């Protein structure tokens, strides 16, 4: 019975993943060593585990292998001359030009232009594509309208709530105004009664004071007349 294939994906179980890493790491290092011996190749292998541990193998010296790798890499990069670069960019420009031509042709056909070169099947595909595009446009438009309606409804609810709050404030101010008016009326009534009382008391005091003054003034007048008469009698008697 043959051995079943293992799917090449990350192993979820940590224990199985560690066991597989150890087995395959040893197998890879063994194959690298065999390749270096059998084929007289300069081999360098660097492995970092998921925990950060380093495993490496080099047929000579890892430093020399890395230096040689860097030198060869730089040489390969320098080998790309200007002619190869021009050819590469010309190829890229041709691809972009062809894509632009196709896009422009599709755009004109969707606008109903240059349809003479299309057969019935192509026209049917174009019609289906336009219907799909139109359906997407309508769906997008309906979605935007629904969102706008929902936003308007939210704004209307907020305005209604604000209106209720303002109505409550107006009623509260009206009630406070009525209470203030009531207090003002009470104060005016009290002031009016106090004013009437003051006027009444003032008149009574004025009458009493007049009588007192009259009595006080009448007494000196009688005394002055008696004194005057006495003086006159003394004068006449002196003359005679």
Image (cartoon, rainbow, N blue to C red):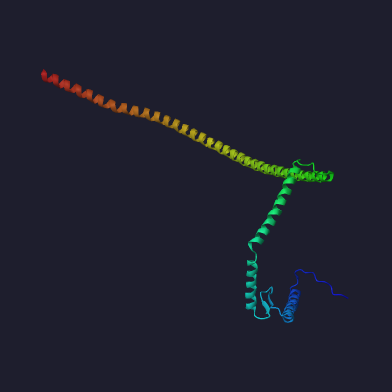
- Quarter occupied by residue 87: bottom right
Q: Residue at x 37, y 28 (%)?
A: 206
Q: How many marks?
A: 0
Q: Position of residue 29 (x, y in %)?
A: 72, 79
Name of the residue lying farthest toward the top: 240
- The N terminus, quarter of image: bottom right
Between 14 and 215, which is closer to the camera in this rendering? 14
At 11% from the left and 18% from the top, the residue drawn is 239
Q: List x then y, in percent, for residue 40.
A: 71, 80
74 up-or-down from 213: above or below? below
Residue at (42% x, 32% y) in the render: 198
Is residue 96 found left or right of 116 in the rendered image?
Answer: left
* Residue ID at (70%, 53%): 96
Query: Farthest right residue?
Result: 1
Check the image and name the residue furthest to the front: 83
- Asked whether 237 or 224 is in front, the reply is 224
| Image quarter (top left, top right, bottom left or bottom right) of the C terminus | top left
When the figure is inspected, residue 30 is found, relative to residue 85, above or below; the finding is below
Q: Is residue 228 left or right of residue 209?
A: left
Asked whether 186 or 30 is in front, the reply is: 30
- Location of residue 126 by image quarter: top right
């Amino acid at each position: 019975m043959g051995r079943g294939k293992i799917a090449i994906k990350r192993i979820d179980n940590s224990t199985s993943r560690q066991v597989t890493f150890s087995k395959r790491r040893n197998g890879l290092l063994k194959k690298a060593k065999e390749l270096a011996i059998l084929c007289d190749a300069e081999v360098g292998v660097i492995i970092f585990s998921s925990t950060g541990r380093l495993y490496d193998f080099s047929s000579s010296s890892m430093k020399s292998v890395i230096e040689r790798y860097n030198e060869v890499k730089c040489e390969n990069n320098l080998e790309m001359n200007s002619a190869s670069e021009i050819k590469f960019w010309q190829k890229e420009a041709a691809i972009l030009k062809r894509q632009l031509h196709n896009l422009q042709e599709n755009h004109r056909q969707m606008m109903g232009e240059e349809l003479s070169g299309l057969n019935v099947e192509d026209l049917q595909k174009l019609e289906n594509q336009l219907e799909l595009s139109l359906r997407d446009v309508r769906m997008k438009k309906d979605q935007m309208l629904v969102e706008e309606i929902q936003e308007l409804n939210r704004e209307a609810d907020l305005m209604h709530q604000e209106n209720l709050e303002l109505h409550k404030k107006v009623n509260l101010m009206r009630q406070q105004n009525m209470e203030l008016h009531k207090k003002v009326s009470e104060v005016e009534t009290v002031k009016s009664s106090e004013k009437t009382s003051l006027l009444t008391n003032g008149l009574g005091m004025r009458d009493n004071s007049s009588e007192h003054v009259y009595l006080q003034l009448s007494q000196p007048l009688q005394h002055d007349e008696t004194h005057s008469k006495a003086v006159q009698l003394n004068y006449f008697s002196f003359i005679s």
